[in-house]
Amino acid sequence: MNNKKNTVSRRNFISSSAALAIGTTLVGPNIFGRNRLLNSPVPNSKIKGVQIGVITYSFRSMPDQSAEATLQYVLDSGINAVELMGDPAETFAGKPESPVNWRTFYGLMGKKRNNELNPEEEKSFLEMQNTMDAYNKEVATWRSTVSMDKFKELRKMYNDAGVTIYAFKPNAFGKDNTDEEINYGFKAAKALGASHVTLEHPSDDEHTEKLGEMASKHGIYVAYHGHTQQTPTFWDTALEQSKYNALNLDLGHFVAAGNEAPLEIIKKKHNHIKSMHVKDRQTPEHGQSNVVWGEGDTPLIEALQLMRDKGYSFPATIELEYDIPEGSNAITEVKKCLAFAKNALES
């Protein structure tokens, strides 16, 4: 997948992208409340017809995880469309406060997924999981009665700042969630202005059929995400079950899974893709690592140019997963990713 010509091309893109991002890349956000937001320039990350967005998970390392601070991170990154994680929106709407440190929990969850937990971390993860189980019951009760007014208010705040919300990812669509929570998730997504919700594929045909049926009643699509279990036929059963079942393709994970010809799945499934996560990962032969854009085996340039040339309308969602270099921060790195995409699309 990486011949000499492509390697040289990627090096050129890295240099050009760095040049585009230089100047403000090391400046963090200045959060001064609503007045700061109103004074922020309106971003535009739709480039040559391709909407470049970002999943707000990319800012998980930032100190303030409120909806207002998250919006500021998005604005400072130059992005005008997002896949919004559940926590900022639900906290804004009054969700009970979590007794668990989310950053720690997500970190352990990632290591658990990769079978990298040591015995002490495994014990901590299990303790957190037990605490989370009790907390989730409390949240389920809250979700069953909460008004949509605060979600509409959040949508207006984001829209007024120039940012649209195209996808919503609350932890409300799993097999352990109640039907009331699932319906809540669809209603909240609609209130936020999203066209679809995203979630990890449950690997359960009965559940994807149920979600597809429930989604049809709300007119909101369910876009299933995958990691290295993705294959070209990974979504086929769900797609056959309901027209409201769709893809949240992750191109980097798809490459890391060892799939050949990653551009082909975009071509074949583009009518079912509601949004696509973009990151650079290596093939299994090269270690599967998340790396700085342009240094891995994921054909990001070619994928973005394919979207441009074919007029595909789904967003390309920046997901920052490589290690943030010392002295940098998430905003800086997202800006670099955006500059890389801009370079690709304007070439």
Image (tube, grey):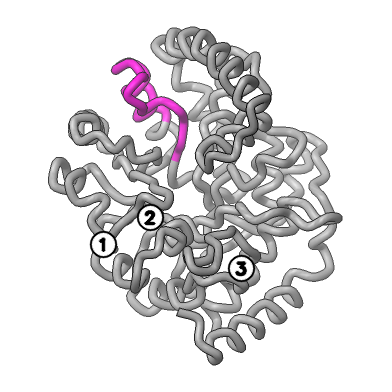
Q: Amino acid at mark 1?
A: Lys
Kindly identify the residue that appears in the image at 59 percent across and 58 percent down.
290
In front here: 283 or 274? 283
Q: CA distance from mark 1 to mark 2?
A: 9 Å
Percent from the top left, x then y, of residue 119?
Answer: 63, 27
Label 3 sits on a secondary structure element that is loop
Residue with the mark numbered 3? 293
Give left or right: position of 175 versus 55: left
Question: Which residue does the numbered mark 1 point to in the structure image?
Answer: 269
- Within 10 Å of the Cα at label 1, are there few (<14), some (14-19), or many (20+) other Cα atoms? some
Residue at x-position 84% and y-position 59%? 26
Callout 1 touching callout 2 (CB < 8 Å): yes
Q: Position of residue 62 (x, y in %)?
A: 74, 40
Please give the range of residues in magenta: 168-188
Residue 342 in magenta stretch: no
Residue drawn at point x = 68 percent, y = 75 percent: 17
Where does label 2 land, which residue?
249
For the view shown, which residue lies furthest in the left direction?
A: 240
In the displayed structure image, the side of residue 270 where residue 5 appears, left or right = right
Q: Amino acid at mark 2?
A: Leu
- Quadrant of image for the C terminus: bottom right
Structural distance between the alpha carbons of marks 3 and 1? 24 Å
| Residue 208 percent location from the top left of the image | 23, 35
